[in-house]
Amino acid sequence: MSQGKRVGIVGAGNVGATVAYSLAMLGACHEIILRDNKMDVARGKALDMSQAASAVRSHTVVKVAEDMSDLVNCDVVVITAGSPRLPGMSRDDLLMINAKITKEVIQGVAKYSPNAIIIMVSNPLDAMTYVALKESGFDRSRVIGMAGILDSSRMAAFIQEKLGYGGGQIRASVMGGHGDDMVPLPRYSTVAGVPLTDVLSDEQIEEVVTRTRHGGAEIVGHLKTGSAYYAPAKSAAIMVDAILKDTKQIHPCAVCLDGEYGYSDVVSGVPVMLGANGAEKIIEVTLNDTEKEMFKNSCASVQELIDTLNTNNFFEGE
């Protein structure tokens, strides 16, 4: 008899805790293990979630990892740990700080859960996914970044707001890196199968695209003291559920490209088939010249971050 499914979550802040709560409510796995440097906070949240799971008669138990060695034999590990961008901190400062945190966490994951599939949520997302891939030594199919589902869901919500109808029937498509250079694809977005171009004007579509690119910043502007977490967490939970249930469904995710779309050794968001082995297949959709140019710019932005890591000798000695 095979053991119950176990999910590790590193970082029990708003995003990590909400991922755990979503999975516990679904009963998606037998055990969730929270790891955070604020142990008492993690313990309190784990107790609270276990009791919530009991309330809905879910079999999921939420526990706390006192040490990375407690994150053992996990099927999936979600990593949300990292520093937020603080006042006066440059993009490169944040990159180096979170790269160091990711490196340390990934070394622990690789040691104690060597067969796990890693889902990266920490920002800058694409660069952290690259760091996780290099530090773990895992096959690229087992290191996946969460961004595309989130960006696509934001685009779908903005489309629904414009239309005033179609909720639950909107399929939006976003590719590329998780940043201002992401690539929303109106051509591949539909409402109940109807092309977006048939229900919105070019001007309205452009407004949706622009708002999608700055979707995270818009929420930060309202919250003032933090960033989005419900939608990011639910997006990560959808990925975990697809992997644990081996659904073979296609979701946009950040993976390291190896010749696909003409790029190699750079992480970008593309449609992938998620299953028990992680990103089991990368789907190559046909892009027109404009979309190709946008995708090129997006990959170049991620490459800049990877170049910064290399310039700072981040991967040396490995």
Image: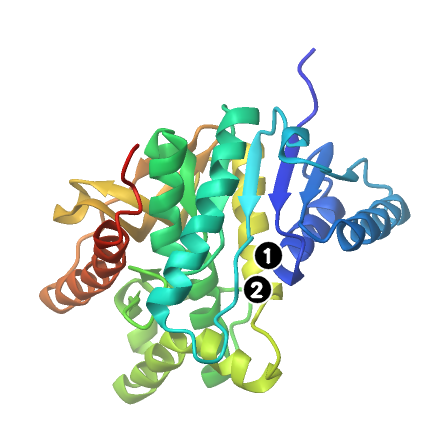
Q: Is residue 83 left or right of residue 280?
A: right
Residue 11 percent across, percent down from the top left: 62, 51
Could you tell me the amino acid type at mark 1?
Lys
- Which residue occupies 48% across, 80% down? 87
- Which residue occupies 70% across, 38% down? 33
Residue 159 percent across, percent down from the top left: 44, 77
| Res. 289 image quadrant | bottom left
Is there any visible trace of residue 171 in the rendered image?
no
- 36 lies above or below 27: below
| Res. 60 image quadrant | top right
Q: Check the picture and name the quadrant holding the N terminus.
A: top right
Circle 1 Cα neighbour tier, 10 Å, few/some/many (<14 / 14–19 / ≥20) = many
| Res. 308 image quadrant | bottom left
Residue 228 percent across, percent down from the top left: 57, 70
Q: Secondary structure at mark 1?
A: helix
Q: Is residue 266 left or right of residue 117?
A: left
- Which residue is tagged 2? 231
Q: Is residue 34 left or right of residue 312?
A: right
Could you tell me the amino acid type at mark 2?
Ala
- 160 lies above or below 5: below
- Which residue is tagged 1? 234
Is there any visible trace of residue 129 in the rendered image?
yes
Q: Secondary structure at mark 2?
A: helix
